[in-house]
Structures are given as C-alpha cells and as structure tokens.
Image (cartoon, grey):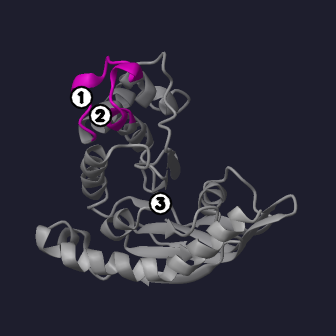
Amino acid sequence: MDLIADRISHRFGALDVLDDVSFTVRAGEVVAIVGPSGCGKSTLLSILGGLLRPSKGAAELRGAPPADSLNPLTFVFQDFALLPWNTVEQNVAFPLLHTSLSAGERRAVIDDALRRTGLSDFRATYPKQLSGGMRQRVGIARALAVRPAILLMDEPLSALDSQTRELLMEDFVRLLADGEMGAVYVTHNLEEAVRLADRVVVLSRRPGRITEIVTITMTRAERAVADARGQLAALQGDLWSLIRKEAIDAEREVQHA
C-alpha cells in the first residue's frame, strides 16, 4: 500500500503553512521529513493521517493493505498519549476494543505487540511507573497492535534523553527491518533521519515547499554497523547544507515578527 501526497497546500487563516507538496511513500518504505522549525512538518503529517483536511490537494492511500491490517495508518506521538488509568496491556488493547477480533485473537495480537517492544513483563504496570522511554514503547506497541501498513511518527524521540533515544532508535531499525511496514518519520534530528529513512523529504521555511528529496543509498543494515559512522556524518552534513540557510531565515522571521 502506497501513501500519496498530491499537491498539498494548507493555510491557517491568513498564514500559509504548506505549498504544493507532492511525494509518495511506497509500500514498506521509510520516508523522513525534515526542515526548519515551523515549516509545516507536523501539519503535513496530520494531513497524511487524515486528521486535517488540506486547503488544496489531497492525501490518499493506493493499493490494498496487508490482509491482517486493522488500520492502515497509525500515529506514534511525541507525548506518548497514554491513558494513565489503564495498565500497559489495557493501553495496547484500547484500539482493538471495537474491532471484529475474538477475545483469543485480541490476546494473540496484544501478546505479539508487547513481545516485539520488550514489554511482556510490564503488562500490568501503569504509565506513571514507567520511564519516558518505556512509555514511548507502550505507544509503539499500541500502534503495532492494529497491524498498520504505514506508521506516522511525529518527533517520537524528541522528549527523551540521549541514551533512551539511542535504544529506541535501535528498536525502530529492528521493527522496520523486514520491509513489511512503512513509516513517515517527522524529525528535527538529522542523525535520526539518515539512520532510519530510505528517503528524506527536505522542506523549506514556511510556507513549506519541497526543496529536495534525498535518497539514502546505504541499506539500514549497512548503516547499523560502527564503521558507517563517517558516512552517516557525511549524509547529515549534506542534509544540513540543504536546510541551514532556510533555518537561519526562519529564525530571523521569528525575531522580527
């Protein structure tokens, strides 16, 4: 299943946020979206996920989702968005409550999502008892429970410390390694983009326009080894060179607003 952004433009009142954005996320592909602060990255993700109707253009899914998919598009948010009165297991089970799955099928799906995210021993734990990294794992497990074709990830690591961020990045690489599930990954962190994505969509300052789509030619397996650090740093430098002037101009606009 492909996710297509077709000439998307958006404005809030008199403020133009996005301008004529088009790209395709192919089945099993990971596409990162980067750009200066305020360029419309999260707005674009909301449009892709159907949470927001664009002023112009459209986002559409093309092709059939996996046979076991309960929801082809699922969000992973920066702030975890967990229900504090529910246990880990109950949070993961929440999107399955109104599906046609039998109790046994729901149990199997929940067990699989908890196992894949390392949460099997924490199923009876409440969110307040968990670290930030573990709470984000619950959010990921909840997303995996509906067997999405494409994950929509909005700065999922930005609220975490560097050590936890590194561990979760390793989890993301592992979860997406088989190519069965794609992702759109919004981030300010260029290291995350080059480590995880197959392609990187670079947006200009507001209104966000695509300035370039960069293809990462190294496989994720090649990027996971220590010897790849120099090449990854070079890729980050290439992306920063595309963003730097736009980021400086965006900061100046904020200061003079």
Question: How much space separates mark 2 and mark 1, taking CA atoms?
Answer: 5 Å
Q: What separation in Å lies between label 1 and label 3 (alpha carbons)?
A: 29 Å
Q: Nearer the viewer, residue 91 or 133?
A: 133
- Give percent across and percent down for residue 90: 42, 22
Tell me if label 2 and label 1 are in contact, CB under 8 Å.
Answer: yes
Report helix, strand or loop for mark 3: loop
Judged left or right of residue 224, residue 58 is right
- Residue bearing the label numbered 2: 114
Tag shown at residue 120: 1
**Quick one: SS at disc 2?**
helix
Q: Is residue 69 above or below residue 137?
A: below
Q: Residues within 10 Å of mark 3 (few under 14, many from 20)?
A: many
Q: Amino acid at mark 2?
A: Leu
Q: Quadrant of residue 109?
A: top left
Q: Which residues are magenta?
A: 117-135
**Percent position of residue 235, x then y:** 33, 79
Residue with the mark numbered 3: 187
Instruction: Give the residue at the far front of this rendering.
Output: 256
Taking the image as shown, residue 99 lies to the left or right of residue 125, namely right
**Quick check: 230 left or right of 217?**
left
Q: Nearer the viewer, mark 1 or mark 3?
A: 3
Eye-nearest disc, 3 or 2? 3
Mark 2 nearby-residue class (10 Å; few <14, some 14–19, many ≥20)? many
Vertical relation: 51 (above or below) 137: below
Q: Position of residue 212 (x, y in %)?
A: 53, 84
Instruction: Report crowding for label 1: few under 14, some 14 to 19, many 20 or more residues within 10 A (C-alpha).
Output: some
Q: Residue at x 49, y 82 (%)?
A: 242
